[in-house]
Image: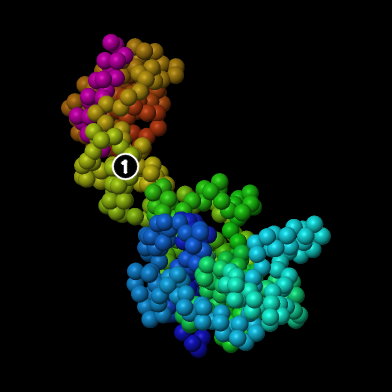
Amino acid sequence: MANEVRVRYAPSPTGMPHIGNIRTAMFNWLFARHHGGKFVVRIEDTDQERLVPGAVDGILDGLEWLDIDWDEGPRVGGDFGSYFQSERLPLYHAEAERLIAQGDAYRCYCTRERLAELRARQERDKVALGYDGHCKHLGGPERRVLEDEGAPYVVRFAMPDNGITHLHDLIRDDVEWQNELVDDFVLLKSDGFPTYHLAVVTDDHFMEISHVLRAEEWLSSAPRHLQLYRALGYEPPEHGHLPMILGPDRAKLSKRHGATSILEYRDDGFLPEALRNFMVLLGWSLDDKTEVMPIETITENFTLDRVGKPAAIFDREKLSWMNGVYIREMTPEALAEAMVPFLEKGLPAHLLPVDREYLLNIVPLIHERIKVLTEAPEMVSYFLEEQPAYDPANLVQRGMSEDEAVRALERSIAALRDCEFGTEALEELLRSLGEELELTPRRFFGTLRWAATGRNVSPPLFETLEVLGRDRVVSRLQWALDSLSG
Ligand code: GLU
């Protein structure tokens, strides 16, 4: 590529960014990194009525959490600022004036009422909706009267009445629109703010953006943008419209499918590396089979010919699975570290702080099974509690008498008080004790598992006993015995 690759992520701070927005950010970032270009973040805050306080920070914090770094934009600056559209109004005004002077745009004084009537008429007549060009045809004197009155106005673009606008899209190939079907859209609103169309084209030009990669929902805006590029005398950037993201039911992705804002994934116990890997597969693939891959592999291979046209399906189950894969790749130390904030949030205060060394012993027991970090408190709590709460009736396994359970506990306590307390030694000891007691392993170990952990599923029993340690195990077995014989 001859010129430098410069791509941008241009979110509107109208809410917290969801997975679709960030997928767009990520594809632009990967494209920039692949080509050794620049990744720019620009805040499109021109719709003053829809601004949501805190959204800009939510967007930037989300990117930072995912380690998607940007070369220019808020928090980092750059030579093409401001990176907030609300601070670039004079530029849009100048370009709008230029278009008016050239005859490519005009002031429209139509009132809200007239526009509502027009729309109602179009709906009734079942014809295409859109502005009818009324003010384009105002005569000079009429226009002067309105100007002298200081009547409020918007500035509209004068779309060509005929001809075709053609886009060679990097992902969707050739797309064409008939100009007569595109109405004279607004460039500047009556509050003096530009619309998305004017701002996006002006900024992409002045920020020297080489490629516009954005969600498919913006494809229908492309003919407007291309006509604006022409009228303004700018060279248009390349365009690529990324495939839609749908839920497993093929409906538009929403919260209902578990697609929440990006920082909620952090709070729900997902790892940024796993989320990134998952997101890149929403539209891109390496070879149709490799799913888990390091970011270096993704960056190295990130080209647009591997981005598909069909909609991508968002499957939260797959994300959880992938998160588990990434968790298993962590060292026990890193996992323990990552679990701490979740334990601090999810465990009752009396179990805190968690002893790091003890936690490091617990981690290998849950490392294979944990999928999201929010599961940590539940998986760890019974290691920490003085005495886990459970119904002692569970101690008596199916097909076993209460006397047998009592005896099993008595004999185990006696044996465990004074034995080597390592996994292998415990296994040997308890297996032969079970045989001596003439109890099947299912029954004997079932009783011991309930007594030691207060639950019927746990990591492998002997490892668990070793980690719990003699004192805890003996006192829990004693509690079990007391509650049966008491
Ligand atoms: N501000 C638009 C958005 O929120 C940007 C669309 C574009 O990338 O052109 O998605």
Residue occupying image coordinates x 79% and y 63%: 127
**Label 1 beta carbon within 8 A of ligand 1:** no
* Colour option used: rainbow
Decide which of 176, 381 is in the foreground and name it.
176
Residue occupying image coordinates x 60% and y 76%: 147
Of the 4 image quadrants, the one containing the C terminus is top left
| Residue 461 versus residue 41 in the image, above or below | above
Asked where in the image residue 363 lies, by quadrant, the reply is top left
Place of residue 138 in the rendered image (x, y in percent of width and height, measured from the top left)? 71, 77
Place of residue 176 in the rendered image (x, y in percent of width and height, measured from the top left)? 71, 76
Residue occupying image coordinates x 37% and y 20%: 391
| Residue 60 versus residue 451 in the image, above or below | below
| Residue 321 versus residue 225 in the image, above or below | above
Q: Main secondary structure of the magenta part?
A: helix
Which stretch is magenta? 467-486
| Residue 466 versus residue 232 in the image, above or below | above
Decide which of 139, 462 is in the foreground and name it.
139
Asked if residue 28 can be seen in this view, the reply is yes
Q: Which residue lies furthest to the right in this view?
A: 125
Residue beneath disc 1: 345
Label 1 residue SS: helix
Place of residue 205 in the rendered image (x, y in percent of width and height, measured from the top left)? 51, 81
Residue occupying image coordinates x 29% and y 11%: 485
Q: Residue furthest left?
A: 418
Q: In this view, does 334 lie to the left or right of 54?
A: left
